[in-house]
Image (cartoon, rainbow, N blue to C red):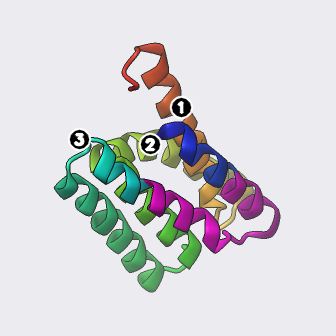
Amino acid sequence: MLLLCAIPLLWAAVMDYRKRIIPDWTWIAIWLIGIASAFLLPFPALYERIAGLLLPGLCLLLLAMRYGGVGGGDIKLTAAAGFCFGLNALAAILFFALPPACVYAAATRQRSVPLAVFLCIGFFMYAGILFIYGLTC
């Protein structure tokens, strides 16, 4: 499942970095992979997937409404990844993604960062750790 999400996530990162736009097909593909895996795999549980969809998505939506700087594509991509991987895995991905994003924002003095790039970095770090420790299926 992780490898299937790599292509849309990489494409979202490239497009977000170049044009600051995340194509709709990327988050839709990740969301559809999540739906298919919900029927095929026993983990993460459905309640964890729904929590992964709603909690980060709503938090980013509130941040976007209050402070700006978070685009709709970032919100949809994060919510789709949360549904696909579940809340716990998304928390690990964000653990690896958000510190470099904050450093990038401070170094470039930008209020808005290409979040898909850092989600992609966090995803590959998380997938690499799972691969190293043999935790993938």
Q: Which residue is mark 1?
A: 125
Q: Quadrant of the C terminus?
A: top left
Whole-number angstrom distance, CA of label 3 to CA of label 1: 23 Å
Cα separation between marks 1 and 2: 8 Å
Mark number, residue 93:
2
Q: Which residue is mark 3?
A: 42
Q: How far across and down, in percent of the image, does residue 58 sit?
A: 33, 74
Q: Do labels 2 and 3 touch, CB within 8 Å?
A: no
- The segment highlighted magenta reads 11-33
User: Mark 1 and mark 3 in contact (Cβ < 8 Å)?
Assistant: no
- Dot 1 lies on which element? helix
Rendered location of residue 82, percent (x, y): 37, 56
In the rendered structure, the answer to whether residue 122 lies left or right of residue 61 reads right
Element type at marker 3?
A: loop
10 Å crowding of disc 3: few (<14), some (14-19), many (20+) = few
* For the residues bearing labels 1 and 2, Cβ distance under 8 angstroms: yes
- Do we see residue 71 in this rendering? no
Sort mark 2 into few (<14), some (14-19) or many (20+) by Cα contacts within 10 Å. many
Mark 2 or mark 3: which comes first in sequence?
3
